[in-house]
Image: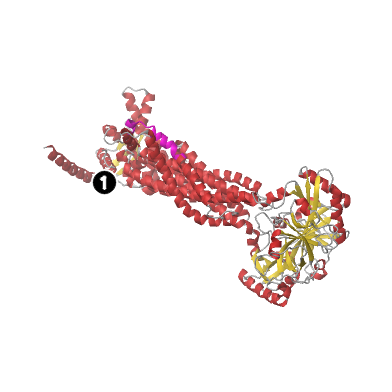
Amino acid sequence: MHPNADVLQGTLDLLILKAVSLEPMHGWGISQPFQQFSSGVLEVNQGSLYPALHRLVKRKWLEASWGTSENNRRARFYKLTAVGRRQLAMETDTWRRFSAAVEAVLAVHQT
Amino acid sequence: MARLANVIRRLRTRLGRVSDGEIDEELRFHLAMEADLLERGGMNRELAVAEAKRRFGGVDRHTEELRDVRGGRIMENLLQDARYAFRLSRRFPAFTAIVLLTLGIAIGANSAIFSVVNATLLRRLPYPDDARLVILFSQNPDKSVPRFSVSYADFLDWRAQTRSFSGMAAGTGTTVTLISDGEPLRLSGQSVTSNYFDVLGVRAERGRLFADGDPTTETASEIVLTYDFWQRELAGDPNIVGRRLRTGGGERTVVGVLPRSYDRDNPGVDAVTVFNPASIPNVESHAQHMLAVIGRLKPGVTQAAAQADLSAVAARLAQQFPDIAGWGANVFMWRDEATRTLRSPLLVLLAAAGLVLLIGCINVVNLLLTRATLREREVALRQALGAARSRLIGQLLVESGELALGGALLGLVVAHFVLLLIVRRAPTGLLPVDITLDSRVLLFTLALAVATTVIAGLWPAFAATTPRLAKAFRDGGRSSSGGARALRARRTLVVAESSLALVLLVCAGLVIQSLRNILAVDLGFDPARVVTMRVNLSGPRYTDTTQVQFFRELQSRLEGRPGIEAIAAANTPPIAPGGITTNLRLIGSTRADGGKVMGPATAITPGYFRTMRMRLLRGRDVSWSDAKPTIVVSQAAANAYWPGESPIGKRIGFGQRDTVGFEVVGVVNDTRARGITVDTPLMIYLSYAGATNVARTMSLVVRGRGDATAIAAATRAAILEIDRTLPVYAVRPVTQVINDSLGQSRLNTTLLTIFAVVALALAAVGIYGVISYSVTLRQQEIGVRMALGASSSNVLTLVLREGGLLALVGTLVGLGGAYFATGLVQSWLFGVGRADVMTIAGTSVVLIAIALLASYLPARRAAKVDPLVAMRGD
């Protein structure tokens, strides 16, 4: 069973926000932690990351600007905005409560 | 410049809008980084780049997805969608080819018929303010002939007493023989009252037209030439005005040339002279019907008002003059009259072409739905990533719009060829010569493309983007419940198109049967190897007596020459629509009407029945030696006028006051003399020999042994031996006259049959498509059945039954539709009823048989399936 599309989208957003919360990152950099996911659970290839990035920019959760990458290439960097930070906190909270609930249910069944 | 571009880019970035160039750059960066990583891991550069692309997924597709999110201006989207749709169409070449072909044929059929409609029904008359022009007719007492020609006396009284018309004029056909040093030239002319061109609003190209004056003091020597004749025969002589021409009726002066536009409405007319009432015997009689009358309505006067006005005047005249008692008058709009015989068949054909397009659209809907299932994952992914539904629907519509536009372009090519077929097969004079795919036709075709996009594209676009289909993501595109629902919808579509195809098939079947009936009609004479041609014995040289002598001498000279069997003349050619219908008096009749009847009459020379190979049933033929004119009647006329009595020795008067009349000497078999489909066997044949006031233009009929050209040449030679100023014209084999008279029926039948066959083929494709889809959906079920012991033939039957059932339901629905549609072609039918059982049963069987054939291919595929593979369902 694959995750529902809505869940998938929400999860992807959360992961992106989390990835850029420490420092501005370019798309490729954000995509790296997803490698394991992309081959398995999420069934999302790297290209699918970009529509999500642009969508988040449009919602003003992220801010994009052109800069220079670690190996001196022109790259587009994404940075968390204030709105995005609030959103991240909220989403993280929701996710934790959700997964805790799932965890609890699974624990009940296992005993 | 570079700086400016930079500023703009920065501005756009700040506004949250990213340019295509930036998207490309960002994606290129990603690919480069990924490739670097892979290279460091030990891959060579080339492989690393390829692998990076693979991990990324299609770059094109993600560019599209990015645009979904980014949003944008409508025009920009439209262009991008169009580009994307174009690329997509190359990804599915078979799909694209089938859709383009279907739409091309269907739209082409419509554009071709519309271009004929455009050149006829929608065309204006070449006269100013043509919406006010009308044609006026007399109406006989039993109202069986609403378009009877008008007497000069009636015309004068109508013109003087009505108040609805700003002008009224009259005319009749005439022939003018132009005498020059070579062979005499016969001009086809019109003879009109001098105000004729004023009423029409036509001005002279050169010189002047006739001066409006007192019609009784016309200058009979004036002549006006048509532009075409002036250019063709007189080489556009610049000094034409004032030139004197020698004609059969004396010298005439050319006073002017008509404009070129006049030729369009009067093809074949060479010259126009002024109508001289004094040349018409008995012209003061209100019963002397012989003119065509036109009029121009006063501004603001409707046809109905003019009709009421005219009817009142006609009723008064009918009371005043006993010989027109009971007669009335009709006024018709000229524009409608000009296209009267074309309107109904053209509208039927347009409707038929419309049905073909509808069936084509249904097929395209089916194909789009099929493709939508193939693209479910693409659409679902884009929706998941945030593409708005309206944006996706818009894009799918652009895709179908592009297909429709391509179909329309192909349709114009198809229309060009259908139009060639129509123009080539139409009988001469039925259609204008200049039918083209003009701007109005192009606009119509474009409108069809738009309509097709909406009809064929909207539903599949909505269906493809409903959230239900987003579930495809979860079950990998094998959503069985959604599939079943889609299958139901498609079956309904196939039933609909089968029923529409059946409607066309039934109509075509009935019309074909009618044409076969027409061709099988017993004409009552033998048309093979008979040539007809016309001669006009005008000029001072011919009187009643010398005319009769002319034909007698021609007969004695020609008969017995090699290749000639028999020759005679009549005042109407065989199979002539219209003909002469006149007042007759059956002298001594005890009938309630006192023997006063209207009957068709033909003047013939002795030998006519022999030449036409008609059978003399009683009495004798008319003879050159008759001292007085004699009469032969048709069998049906004998039965109708003197039931139970011998007609031999009875007398018939011409005109109701003729109490002496002429003697009936014989009875001949009935013929279809007034047209094959016109059932008027009543006919009075009056001997030409000894008659007075005889017709000046006669049709010769010559039966020979060789081909038509040889017969015509021998006849022409013999005529010129007698009178070398006599032109011979309208030379045609009678079989060709008959064929031409069937030209419109044949053309209608051909087109309707083509449309029906195309509809049937499209329906077959539709059935094939839906059965294939159904077989794919039922693969697992079929596998289980086979595993449980069902044989291949069981499976074959199962699938065939599904196809047959769809066609059967379609047939039943279609029969309901045919019940209404056949009403539209009823006037085309001959010898076959609207509800002809054989035709309906036959076409139903054809449809079901074709449906079974179309189901057979997927059925065989299903029957060959390996049960194990099918059950796994991959």
Using the rendered image of the protein, determine whether residue B657 is visible from the camera's viewpoint: yes
- Tell me the colour scheme of the image: secondary structure
Asked whether residue B861 is drawn in magenta, I would say yes
Percent x, y for residue B480?
32, 41
Q: Which residue is mark 1?
A: A82
Q: Name the spot of residue B195 as percent of width and height, x first.
A: 75, 67
User: Does residue B245 appear in the picture of this structure?
Assistant: no
B861 vs B474, nearest the viewer: B861
- Would you say B647 lies left or right of B54 here? right
Three-letter amino acid code of the residue under disc 1: Ala
Q: Is residue B588 above or below residue B676?
A: below
Q: Residue furthest left?
A: A111
Q: Could you tell me residue B331's position as x and y percent?
A: 65, 68
Closer to us: A46 or B619: B619
Kindly indicate the quadrant of the structure image that contains residue B328.
bottom right
Q: In the rendered image of this protein, does residue B187 appear above or below residue B692?
A: above
Q: Mark 1, chain letter?
A: A
At a point 58% along the width and 43% down the height, the residue shown is B413
Identified at 80% across, 58% down, the residue is B622
Magenta segment: B853-870
Q: Main secondary structure of the magenta part?
A: helix
Quadrant of the snapshot with the C terminus of chain B: top left
Q: Is residue B355 left or right of residue B705?
A: left
- Who is closer to the viewer here, B241 or B348? B348
Is residue B538 shown above or below B858? below
* Local secondary structure at mark 1: helix
Q: Is residue B426 above or below residue B168?
A: above
Judge by depth and name the residue closer to the eye, A16 or B677: B677
Magenta-span inclusion, residue B91: no
Q: Position of residue B653 (x, y in %)?
A: 77, 67
